[in-house]
Image: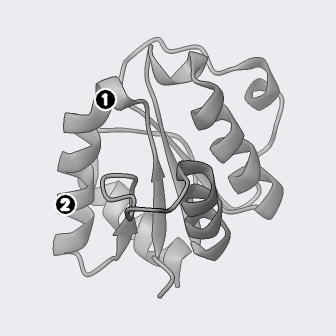
């Protein structure tokens, strides 16, 4: 079953990603993130399947994730599909070059973790 939200983050931000995943789940949204890769399945195959099936890609930008090849690739796919929702975990984070010039056609804006009610409402809208 496809998740409403594919959550992209750097592994060093795992605790903050988990907190957001729990928050979104309490709002009735299904969230896929890479905490459970089934035995015998390759990481990249599982990621691609989940990313392709998701209705919305939330990318948690932080000092660590802006240099992650995986996070940038997942964000690029969300941007290509016009379902990218960027969220900043750290203040002053400079987006990777490929995302600075892009207009996010569906995303209502860039959020900070400090405004979870805005994020919940917007994600609910985008996931349906």
Please tell me which residue is depicted at 41% across the width and 75% down the height of the picture. Answer: 124
Please tell me which residue is depicted at 37% across the width and 56% down the height of the picture. Answer: 119
Q: CA distance from mark 2 to mark 1?
A: 16 Å
Q: Is residue 97 left or right of residue 16?
A: right
Q: Is residue 113 left or right of residue 59?
A: left
Residue 42 percent location from the top left of the image: 55, 54
Residue at image mark 2: 23
The residue lying toward the viewer, choosing from 106 and 14, is: 14
Q: Residues within 10 Å of mark 2 (few under 14, many from 20)?
A: some
Establish if 116 lies above or below 86. Answer: below
Most distant residue in the front direction: 40
Q: Element under label 2?
A: helix
Give the mark nearest the N terminus, 2 or 1: 1
Please tell me which residue is depicted at 57% across the width and 72% down the height of the picture. Answer: 54
Residue 27 percent location from the top left of the image: 22, 75
Q: Is residue 57 visible?
A: yes
Quarter of the image where one finds residue 17: top left
Q: How many numbered discs sit on the rendered protein?
A: 2
Residue at image mark 1: 13
Q: Is residue 114 visible?
A: no
Residue 67 percent location from the top left of the image: 59, 16
Q: Residues within 10 Å of mark 1 (few under 14, many from 20)?
A: some
């Amino acid at each position: 079953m496809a998740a409403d939200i594919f959550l992209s983050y750097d592994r060093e931000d795992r605790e903050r990603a988990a907190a957001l995943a729990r928050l979104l789940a309490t709002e009735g949204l299904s969230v896929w993130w890479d905490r459970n890769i089934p035995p015998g399945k390759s990481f990249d195959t599982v990621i691609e399947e989940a990313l392709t099936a998701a209705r919305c890609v939330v990318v948690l930008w932080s000092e660590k994730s802006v240099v992650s090849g995986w996070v940038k690739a997942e964000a690029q796919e969300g941007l290509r599909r016009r379902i990218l929702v960027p969220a900043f975990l750290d203040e002053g984070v400079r987006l990777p070059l490929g995302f600075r010039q892009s207009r996010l056609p569906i995303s209502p804006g860039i959020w900070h973790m400090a405004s979870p009610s805005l994020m919940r409402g917007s994600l609910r809208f985008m996931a349906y």
